Amino acid sequence: MHEVIIDCDPGIDDCLALLYALKSPHLQVKAICVVCGNVPTKIGVRNVFHCLAKCNRLDIPVYVGADQPLVVDFTSAQDTHGMDGLGESQLASDVVDMPIQSETAPAFYARIFAQPTQLSVIALGPLTNIALALELNPSIGSNMQRFVSMGGAYLSHGNCSPVAEYNYWCDPHAARAVYQNLNQTIEMVGLDVTREIVFTPNLLSYCQYVQPEMGTYLARLVQFYFDFHWQQEHILGCVINDPLAVAYFIQPQLCEGFTTFVDVETQGIARGQTLVDRHHFWQKKANAKVLTKVLPDQFFIQFLSVLLDAPASVIAEDLKLWKIG
């Protein structure tokens, strides 16, 4: 059982990742921290509580973090996720006045990682909270087990500019600060692997047949995302980036990659680009593991098994037999 803190900006795919993490028998989610990103922080908090309530896990503490990037102006991704962050589904409309922790997310990190722990962090959004925590306690990275970040791109094109992935583009100064100062290998789950994780209409239909209640819920959640991906990239379905970060954390064998030095551009037309020094041009110590290959079928077997409360062997056989995907 892995103990984790999840830092997120929910978002449709963040919501899917949270449901997956909360339901997974392999993870013990100790806390959730919220950062501005896909949606403003206030909306993100509401969406976190929606996920907690759906999984009957309102015992998990929620810490509110940054509502602005370190330097640049905040630009949400509500064009992608809807104004409510959940595809205009209004799924979280019944969430009111849930109790948040009085301590801020950066202060929580600084305190909880003041000494070595068994905790790891899965960061699904911009890295603002982590960067602010490093200012309070520069040793946080040394005192955690692992740090997985959904963000960046190596050979893949970007999703909010020709070269940049949204999380790092949203707060490039925070991303750069974390890569330069965390003193922990950053496991970069970037667009090179997440673009392979496409939740298709066939998979959605399969979910509706296997587990009608969850299938109906997923249909409400992802339809806006389906429409966006078709309009923007003519993808039939939607790329669900964040659940892969959780799945990879649980099963690192799902992905392959290499360790190297990574920096992040903070300005100009290349803002947010991850500069991956695979050939050691700069001769700097490696600070990241950059993922480049993924097993999408194995991901979906594990992901759907957890979400649908079905044996992985049954999911695997169904996906193979009926060529669902």
Image (cartoon, grey):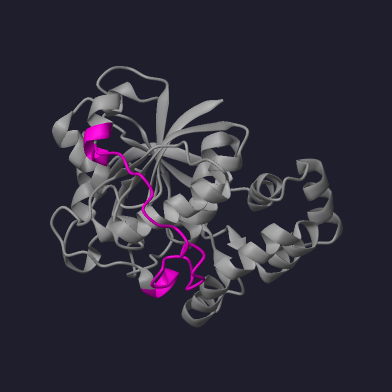
Corner quadrant of residue 203: bottom right
Instruction: Tell me which residue sits at (75%, 61%) in the image.
Output: 212
Q: Can the viewer see residue 112 in this picture? A: yes
From the viewer's perspective, is residue 106 above or below residue 115?
A: below
In reply to whether residue 225 is colored magenta, the answer given is no
- Quarter holding the C terminus is bottom right
The kind of secondary structure the magenta stretch mainly shows is: loop
In reply to whether residue 84 is colored magenta, the answer given is yes
For this rendering, which residue is in front, 91 or 21? Answer: 91
Q: Which residue ends up furthest to the top in the rendered image? A: 116
Instruction: Tell me which residue sits at (49%, 70%) in the image.
Output: 87
Q: Which residue ends up furthest to the bottom in the rendered image? A: 231
From the viewer's perspective, is residue 3 above or below residue 93?
A: above
Q: In this view, does 109 lie to the left or right of 31?
A: left
Across and down, in percent, residue 229 comes to 51, 74
Q: In this view, does 283 lie to the left or right of 5?
A: left
From the viewer's perspective, is residue 170 above or below residue 5?
A: below
- Quarter holding the N terminus is top right
Across and down, in percent, residue 251 comes to 59, 35
Corner quadrant of residue 129: top left
Across and down, in percent, residue 210 comes to 79, 57
For this rendering, which residue is in front, 257 or 84? Answer: 84
Instruction: Tell me which residue sits at (64%, 52%) in the image.
Output: 296
Across and down, in percent, residue 26 comes to 60, 31
Instruction: Tell me which residue sits at (39%, 37%) in the image.
Output: 61
Corner quadrant of residue 318: bottom right
For this rendering, which residue is in front, 320 or 281? Answer: 320
All told, the count of numbered labels is 0
What range is drawn magenta here?
79-108
